[in-house]
Amino acid sequence: MTGVFADDGGGTETVATGPRMPAETPGEENSPSATKSSSSRSENVVISAASNPELAALLQLGDYCDAAINRFAATYDGRSIMFDGSVAAMSPHGNYKTRYDMLIGAGNFSVTAARGPAFQFTDVNTVSDLHYAGNVPDAIGVGTNLTVTATVGDYNPTTCLFQLQPVKTELR
């Protein structure tokens, strides 16, 4: 459990460096719920390019199939990231008329250049599932510039698609 934060009961967080650390408060145990709640505090911090050099480098990659994407996805699985992006492509999800698979690129929309991974939102409604902050548009489409906050999901090295789950979206 290296790197897991645990509350010692006195408000101080300690880092568990072995398989289990004994509780310092009599009768307290390292229960899964205690470990989950304390580790989720650190995981709830949204990482951005300004606060995380790995994300900054990822957003500047010239190859959307770079092996660094798979490493980043594995390291930050389930964590929230925030970045400026744009809708690069979108298509209906299956036979639905109001649900889409969206390709999100890093940075401002461009028809001539692309940087970073091929982020994908799968099976989303562009109004209700993107959790807008600020102005809520009637619709969005290819070319819309956004600030995206999303949960890191799986990366498929065969398709080079990096799955994200939208948490908050802002128009820019």
Image (cartoon, rainbow, N blue to C red):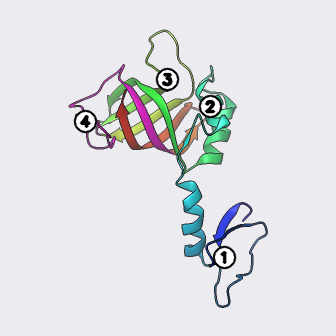
Q: Which residue is mark 4?
A: 136
Name which residue type carries label 1.
Asp
Looking at the rendering, the stretch of residues picked out in magenta corresponds to 125-151
Image point 25% across, 35% down: which residue? Answer: 136
Residue 82 magenta-highlighted:
no
**CB of mark 4 within 8 Å of CB of mark 3?**
no
Image point 36% across, 26% down: which residue? Answer: 90
Q: Quadrant of residue 109?
A: top left
If the image is split into quadrants, where does the C terminus sit? top left
Q: Which residue is mark 1?
A: 8
Q: Is residue 117 above or below residue 122?
A: above
Secondary structure type for disc 4: loop
Q: Which residue is mark 2?
A: 56
Judged by depth in the image, the label closer to the viewer, 1 or 3, is: 1
Q: Is residue 107 above or below residue 24?
A: above
**CB of mark 1 within 8 Å of CB of mark 3?**
no
Image point 26% across, 35% down: which residue? Answer: 95
